[in-house]
Image (spheres, rainbow, N blue to C red):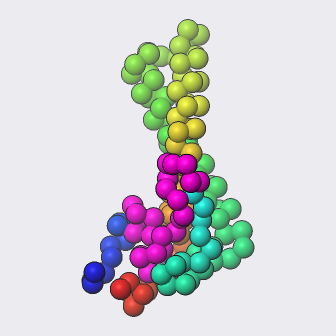
């Protein structure tokens, strides 16, 4: 395969921010082999965690994603069950908790991808690795 890999493709497919070829994670998002973040890209050999503790910042991204998802889950519950009242309280609580639980692997993965690809201006795409 030749030519440049687009940023969108790299984000959707969880590719390295330097080369857009190597995978950032081991394992799959949902599955029995739990996903881990690789230390070094297998394609371009750049460090993925550029400095120790770098991914702590991903917690804030993941927090923002959680807030958006909870608002969305509440809105869906509102459409199905009606306004938040005493008799719909548990519907809201269960939907939000199950939603957060199911989305945890998604948030883990995409908070780190957003941090690497969007929020880290000093991580540069290097087209000469992209081949
Ligand atoms: Zn790479």
Quadrant containing the C terminus is bottom left
**Left-right relation of 72 to 51:** left
Q: Quadrant of residue 104?
A: top right
- Residue ID at (54%, 78%): 41
Query: Is 124 or 129 nearer to us in this picture?
Result: 129
Q: Is residue 61 magenta?
A: no
Image: 24 above or below 33: below
Quadrant containing the N terminus is bottom left
Query: Is 78 or 29 nearer to us in this picture?
Result: 29
Q: Quadrant of residue 10?
A: bottom left
Give the magenta part as a residue range. 10-34
Please, what is the dominant secondary structure of the magenta stretch?
Answer: loop
Asked whether residue 119 appears in the rendered view, the answer is no
Image: 6 above or below 45: above
* Residue 72 x %, y %: 45, 35
Image: 81 above or below 40: above
* Residue 118 x %, y %: 48, 68
Image: 54 above or below 94: below
* Residue 32 x %, y %: 55, 49
């Amino acid at each position: 395969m030749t030519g440049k890999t687009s940023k969108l493709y790299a984000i959707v497919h969880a590719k390295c921010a330097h080369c857009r070829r190597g995978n950032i994670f081991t394992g799959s998002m949902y599955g029995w082999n739990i996903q881990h973040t690789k230390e070094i890209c297998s394609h371009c050999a750049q460090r993925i965690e550029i400095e120790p503790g770098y991914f702590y910042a991903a917690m804030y991204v993941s927090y923002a994603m959680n807030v958006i998802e909870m608002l969305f889950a509440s809105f869906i519950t509102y459409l199905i069950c009606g306004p938040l009242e005493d008799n719909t309280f548990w519907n809201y609580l269960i939907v939000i908790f199950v939603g957060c639980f199911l989305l945890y692997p998604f948030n883990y993965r995409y908070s780190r991808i957003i941090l690497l690809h969007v929020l880290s201006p000093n991580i540069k795409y290097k087209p000469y690795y992209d081949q």
